[in-house]
Amino acid sequence: MKDATAVFPGSFDPFTRGHENLVRRASSMFEKVIVAVAASRQETLFPLAERVEIAAEVLCPIPNVQIIGFDCLLVDFLRERGIRIVVRGVRTLADFEYEARMMAMNRKLYPAMETVFLLPAEEHGYLSASVVREIARHGGDVSQFVPEAVFSRLRRKF
């Protein structure tokens, strides 16, 4: 797999230390990792351009990582770039069940696609962007859950 490119998609709203950990680990497994920041039909804390900027700032020390925003089906994003591998993080059985359903549907649309599931590092197993958003929204300290680039933006926002 070291000579392959993988895509790690998500909304990354906000980008957490768990996301960072998964990208770092994936970058050691694949020649190139594209962090694909998805536009969202739901309201987001940060607009797409800022989420791309944040991910780029956090991940700039990792030379084989590229950040791209996208607003289409994931399978179309992959197909347009000739990429077959998707990396997804799963924390719980519920995450796995959801991701397995998504994987099955995506493979119907793009049979060449393969999904690699990574469990988070133990210290990030409980971490989710939605929980970080809620804590920050209510004035809680999220500094241990997000990189500094995210923390400073959250402080300004709230």
Image (cartoon, rainbow, N blue to C red):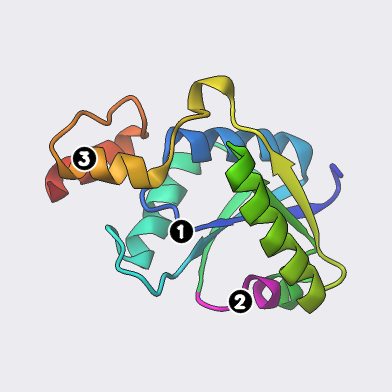
Residue depicted at 18% across the width and 32% down the height: 140
The magenta-colored residue range is: 71-77
Contact between marks 3 and 1 (CB within 8 A): the answer is no
The residue at the far top in this view is: 123
Q: Residues within 10 Å of mark 3 (few under 14, many from 20)?
A: some
* N-term-proximal mark, 3 vs 2: 2
* Nearest to the observer: residue 128 or residue 55: 128
Q: Is residue 91 above or below residue 107?
A: above
Secondary structure of residue under mark 1: loop
Instruction: Rate crowding at label 2 as few (under 14), some (14 to 19) or many (20 or more) other CA atoms within 10 Å.
Output: few
Of the numbered discs 3 and 1, the one sitting upstream in the chain is 1
Is any part of residue 7 visible from this angle? no
45 is higher (above) or lower (below) than 77: above
Residue 149: % across, % down = 31, 40
User: Residue 34 location, x and y as percent?
Assistant: 63, 55
Amino acid at the residue labelled 2: Leu
Q: Distance from label 3 to label 2 (Cα)? A: 30 Å
Measure how far apart labels 1 and 2 are at the Cα level: 13 Å
Q: Which mark is residue 73?
A: 2
Residue wearing tag 3: 136
10 over 148 or under it: above or below? below
Task: Specify the label residue 11 is tagged with.
Answer: 1
Which secondary structure lies at badge 3?
A: helix
Q: Do the CB atoms of the residues marked 1 and 2 lie less than 8 Å apart?
A: no
Q: Nearer the viewer, residue 139 or 21?
A: 139
